[in-house]
Image (cartoon, rainbow, N blue to C red):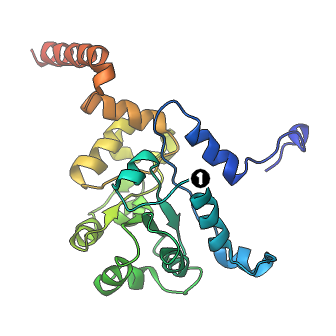
Amino acid sequence: MILSGHAGKFSIITFEEFISVALDASRTVGIYPEIKDPVFINKHVKWADGKKFEDKFVDTLLKYGYRGQYMSENWLKQPLFIQSFAPSSLVHVSNLTDSPKIFLIDDTTVRTQDTNQSYWEITSDDYLAYISNYVVGLGPWKDTIVPVAKNYLLEPTDLVARAHAHNLQVHPYTYRNENQFLHFDFHQDPYAEFDFWINTMGVDGLFTDFAGSVHKYQELKSPHPKDATANSLLVKIAQLIAAYEGH
């Protein structure tokens, strides 16, 4: 939706401008770009050199020094995950860069946009074994991992365990702080949701619209050395309150 009062007043940030925000930061900042709807873009956009959208995408990353396998020396300097809902794009990109890739998985009713495969096909053990040759992890919609009914969590599936069995990380999406997106089990507390997914479900990462909240949760659970004094004080206060409430 475009509000008439703002039409034409603001431009859309380019991919290179987005990268520059990370590279110009005073600390190491990773990026997690998505190859968005490559089937549509490759159908309607033609480049003079005959390259595909995925080729241009990787060319830009390489131009700015993004390369290297997950946890390699170069990756640690410029962290990157490449994500896409299109498995054929991820396979193609694997021939262009060794940077880590994440296969995004939609709702159980949605088929893959490029290969027309069902949710059940792409989450089968045979397919996980196949795609693990090209990606380091999965990015499923969180409600497919733990189904929901009437805004309450149901019995979790075994997707996380099976993904881990194939040496695949799991980075579910999307975690949001607003009450309408928090299931009743979490009592309107996003920290409770983070805790459930990290410590109960055992996922390896969280894709969120509220990075600040996840950062605060991390600092509370495992303070950064620079903030150790302030955080240790907060932890002590929380412990004192908990002890007092326990009497």
Residue at x 45%, y 74% (from the top left corner): 108
Question: Residue placed at 45% from the left, 56% from the top?
Answer: 173
Residue furthest to the left: 247
Percent from the top left, x then y, of residue 40? 71, 76
Q: Residue 234's quadrant in the figure?
A: top left
* Residue 15 horizontal/vertical position (percent): 67, 53
Left or right: residue 200 versus residue 174 is left
Residue at figure coordinates x 55%, y 87% from the top left: 116
Residue 218 image position (x, y, % from top left): 32, 35
Q: Element under label 1?
A: loop
Amino acid type for the residue under numbered disc 1: Tyr
Q: Nearer the viewer, residue 170 or 109?
A: 170
| Tag 1 residue | 64
- Residue toward you, 165 or 107: 165
Work out whether residue 188 can be spotted: no
Up-down: is 72 above or below 181? below
Q: Where residue 155 sits in the image (x, y, percent)?
A: 26, 63
**Residue 200, above or below 53:** above
> In this rendering, is residue 12 above or below 124?
above
